[in-house]
Amino acid sequence: MNTEQINGGDKPQNKKYTAANSLINYYLAIMFTFFPLFLTDQYAHARTDKFWLFVILTAVTVVAVGICRGIEISEARRIGEKQSFLLPLNVTDIFMLCFVGFAAISTIISQHPYEAFFAFGCRDNGLFLLIFYMLMYFAVTRNYVRKDYVFAGYLIASCIVALLTVLNFYYIDPLNIMAGYDEETILDFGSTIGNKNIIATYMCVFLPVAVGLFVVSEKRFMRILSGVAIVFAYTGLICADSTSDILGLAVILPVMLIFFSRSFGYLKRYLLALTIAFASGKLLQIFSLFDLRDKGFEFMQSFLINSPLIYILIAVCGGGWLLMCFIGKNGEPAYPAKLMQGIFIALFAAAVIAAVGAFIYYSFIDLESDIGEFEKLLRFDDYWGTHRGFM
């Protein structure tokens, strides 16, 4: 038995790698690999397929982990060790309980409590599913032990999802997923995830995970795999072709820059990760050489692929990485971490204030100026946010 750091409660504890730990890691490996790729009948039952797969896997895992933990605690008490089935709650635990608690109150006082609880036929996102989210959360946070195979599986499966997203965007359908669907459905769906907005959300998780592992991993295999995953994640995010993925990218990149600027080594690797990402966007221009039919890029996606300004971004990030490699060739130099973080926080705050100011100005003051493609983001009206302004 190996001694590992167990993540659970307020503080990590050194314990043996137990059956409960193994079950959670296997559960995560399945959820990270099989779950995103699982479909039984193209898109027709995608949501239902994934809903029941999640519910069944989670229920089986939670029960099995509970049994294992009960056996472990009984054995520990038998030999005189003090162990409790419940660990102290931290702040995140309390927020999770409050979230589900408020949802329970909403369900109870609803005019249609049965429908609110199960939400069958309404995307299934009722209290029933939220309870399973909570069970999964507590099972994972109490028993997860980091193993590289879990994240390696996630990166590989997500690369497949991203590759399918890119291919489907160019009407290349190796899995015959789009066969029989009308043009409107084909435009809005792709890969094994389905709706392009959900694909965009998936990519907005995949990309920072790939970048984060590329920056912090010390093992060469994980670093190489993460670097390859960045290429797939970024191109998949662009080909998801949703406004939400661009908004996600606009938040992800500066926040990760602030986080990784706390270390000279992390910042150097992060600049290389950005270089890989921006350069991979330019790879999509290769598809245009073959005159392939595509679903059509929105304004910002087209900018990230075709604008000459992206070459400047690549040069800045790549040049910064090379400069830091030169500075640190004889060892990591003295690095003003707090100052650098402060500068990046100030720049990000200024950008947020500018964006909010532009939104207020074009939504409530200047209602006439033509701001082109930015109107869907900066001018609040009935059409803002895919008709969310109207709602």
Image (tube, rainbow, N blue to C red):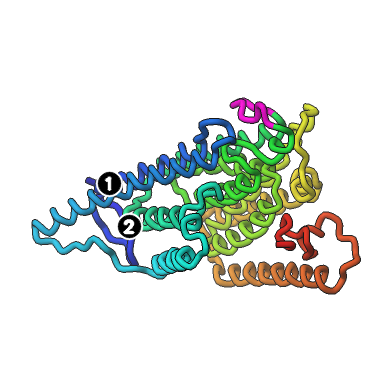
Image quadrant assignment for residue 165: top right
Q: Which quadrant, please, contains the N terminus?
A: top left
**Residue type at tag 1:** Ala
- The answer to whether residue 61 is above or below residue 138 is above
Task: Using residue 201 as the reference point, say whether residue 135 is left or right of it.
Answer: left
Task: Using residue 253 as the reference point, say whether residue 126 is left or right of it.
Answer: left
The disc at residue 195 is none
Foreground residue, 211 or 384? 384
Q: How crowded is the residue under tag 2: few (<14 C-alpha within 10 Å), some, or many (20+)?
A: some
Query: In the rendered image, which residue does mark 1 sit on?
Result: 64
Task: Using residue 134 as the reference point, say whether residue 278 is left or right of it.
Answer: right
Q: Using the rendered image of the protein, determine whether residue 133 is visible from the camera's viewpoint.
A: yes
The disc at residue 142 is 2
Which residue is pictured at 64% across the width and 50% down the height? Answer: 274
> What secondary structure prevails in the magenta region?
loop
Q: Which quadrant, please, contains the C terminus?
A: bottom right
**Residue type at tag 2:** Arg
Give the image location of residue 210, x and y in percent: 54, 47
Which residue is pictured at 66% across the width and 67% down the height? Answer: 348
- The answer to whether residue 308 is above or below residue 73 is above
Residue 130 lies within the magenta run: no
SS type, badge 2:
helix
Q: Using the rendered image of the protein, determine whether residue 276 is visible from the camera's viewpoint.
A: no
Give the image location of residue 237, x and y in percent: 65, 45
Q: Nearer the viewer, mark 2 or mark 1?
A: 1
Image quadrant assignment for residue 241: top right
Region in magenta: 172-181
